Amino acid sequence: MHTRNLILPSVTLENIPFLWAKNDILIFFIDMNSYDSPGTEFLDNHEKENLEKLQTLYFKKRFIVSRTVLKHILCCLLNKESSLDISTYKDRHGEVRIFNHDDLHICISYSENIAAIAISRVKIGIDIEIKRPFELKKTLKYLHNTPFYSGKPVDDVGILKAWTLKEAYCKYSNIDMLSSLNKKPGLDNVSYFNFLLNGKYILSIVTEMGQHIFNLSYLDLSYLDLSYLDLSCLEKINSYQGEAVWKTTENLSKQE
């Protein structure tokens, strides 16, 4: 499968309604290091209960940041008065869902300080990993049944392609990753794609078979302090002057 190299363009919340009107899938990337002390003001009681189950500050922070940013995105996308009007939950498969919006599919992936948040009109699985060295001997035994591994020597990027594709497929199919490590993903009936982002991250996408229009972009929230600031998205959208610019709209189709 061909891996496309992509430099992510930057967008703001005001771009989102324009992007959503033109795309089936939006995938936003955020730097969690931008949020030193995220507050829980945007979490409802159910989400706060889930937060308390997390054991480390790292996992707590990424939960707070990802849910807060997701709500701000959906506030604009769904034309809500406030991000506080949006509640998330996990279904029995562990997929993030939005109350009263079963037509939306959400998938979130993390790698070190980066979070990738996908909002889609069709079922989707994504996985992102930062480029880093792997212990080849330990990893290859799990990846022999992938499109990337043919028994020939493989580098770290090749391993990451295989690993992220398998994980994205598991998320798409609601399959546990540990139980499927030595199994071949059923890629004949899905569309899948792979990116090298900013020369640093490997991203794999798995979705329903067919051609779907999608957009990948870095979400710039530097002008917002999400630790305390609520956002009236309607006011922000109505005050926005100009046209959204997006450069990464593609046809997502099955790659041979």
Image: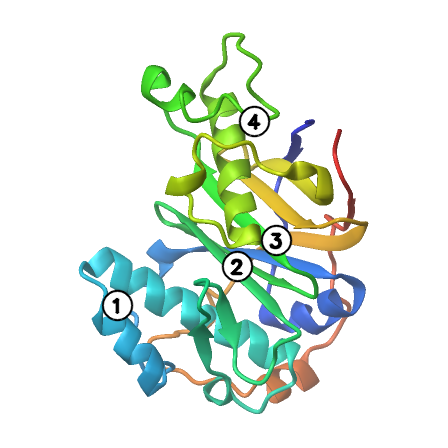
C-beta proximity under 8 Å, tags 3 and 4? no
Mark closer to the observer (3, 4): 4
Tag 3 secondary structure: strand
Q: Please give the residue where the numbered disc 3 appears in the rendered image.
A: 217
C-beta proximity under 8 Å, tags 4 and 2? no
How far apart in space, not on screen, are marks 1 and 3 (Cα)? 24 Å
Q: Which mark is first along the chain, 2 or 3?
A: 2
Instruction: Give above or below for 147 relative to 25.
Output: above
Amino acid type at image mark 4: Thr
Task: Tell me where residue 228 appears, x and y as whole percent.
Answer: 34, 81
Determine whether, in the image, residue 137 is placed left or right of residue 115: left
Task: Tell me where residue 208 appears, x and y as whole percent.
Answer: 71, 52
Amino acid type at image mark 2: Cys
How far apart in space, not on screen, are marks 1 and 2 (Cα)? 24 Å
Neighbor class of circle 2 (other Cα within 10 Å; few <14, some 14-19, many 20+) is many
Q: Residue at x 47, y 16 (%)?
A: 155
Tag 2 secondary structure: strand
Asked whether 184 or 52 is in front, the reply is 184
State how many labels appear: 4
Q: Residue at x 42, y 20 (%)?
A: 140
Amino acid type at image mark 3: Ser
Q: Which mark is residue 132?
A: none
Mark closer to the observer (3, 2): 2
Task: Tell me where residue 91 appears, x and y as whole percent.
Answer: 46, 70
Where is residue 56, by image quadrant? bottom left
Task: Tell me where residue 98 appears, x and y as whole percent.
Answer: 53, 77
Q: Please give the residue where the numbered disc 2 appears in the rendered image.
A: 107
Mark closer to the observer (1, 2): 2
Q: Please give the residue where the numbered disc 1 appears in the rendered image.
A: 37
